Image (cartoon, rainbow, N blue to C red):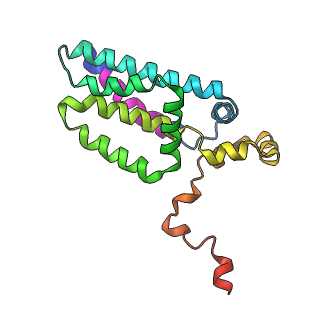
Amino acid sequence: MTWNILQLIFCATPFVLSLALYKSNRPFMAKFYTAMTRSVKARKLYVQVLLILLLLFHYVYTSGHVGEFGVLLSTAVCAAMYSFRRTDRWLWGLCDRPRAFVTLALAALVIGFVPHLYTTAVTVIYLLLAALFYPSVRVMAECKDADALSEWAKHPELLSESYHDYHHARLPHDADSGNSDISAQ
């Protein structure tokens, strides 16, 4: 029973964290965003914490379901995550490609219903959660701009807005927001 409660906690954690912290303007999140954009060591620590959480989930799952071999696929994903460069590319790829993010989320939803692939679905969900809080290539480029850094230092909430501003996602209500020059011709 304890193992099932721990599994439920591991499954609920990504949803609770994303609801509570996504686009948050809290001071500790501003510090987190700043550290993630400026320091490779902070991003390495972030990836290592993610890997430790996943390995802990695997331990809890295998302790409660002895002899289950479906955990091998997700363990292979965790083994691939030992390389920071590889995981860094994965997370940036998920940040910068919303279509890949949605496709992977739908795949996790579908494979979550296959009993032997449950751990793989949870692993993918944790990767998606990690990608939500990982700096995109655009934010990393803005971090090199001195004007943006001074604005972020004065107003930390601007970093949060920039961090989660996916202007390239092209929402239908924003489709004509940048075309004022074209319509004037």
Query: 154 and 138: which one is in front?
Result: 138
Image-based side of 25 in relation to 121, left or right: right
Residue 31 sits above or below residue 138 on the image: above
Total numbered circles: 0
Residue 14 sits above or below residue 151 on the image: above
Q: Is residue 6 magenta?
A: no
Res 4 → quadrant: top left
| Range of residues picked out in magenta | 7-19
Residue 149: image location, x then y, percent: 78, 42
Query: 157 and 81: which one is in front?
Result: 81
Q: Measuring 64% from the left and 48% from the top, which residue is drawn there?
A: 138
Residue 38: image location, x then y, percent: 70, 33
Residue 151 sits above or below residue 118 on the image: below
Residue 104: image location, x then y, percent: 36, 44
From the image, give the main secondary structure of the stretch colored magenta. Answer: helix
Image-based side of 108 in relation to 175, left or right: left
Q: Quadrant of the N terminus?
A: top left
Residue 150 sits above or below residue 76 on the image: below
Do we see residue 157 in this rendering?
Answer: yes
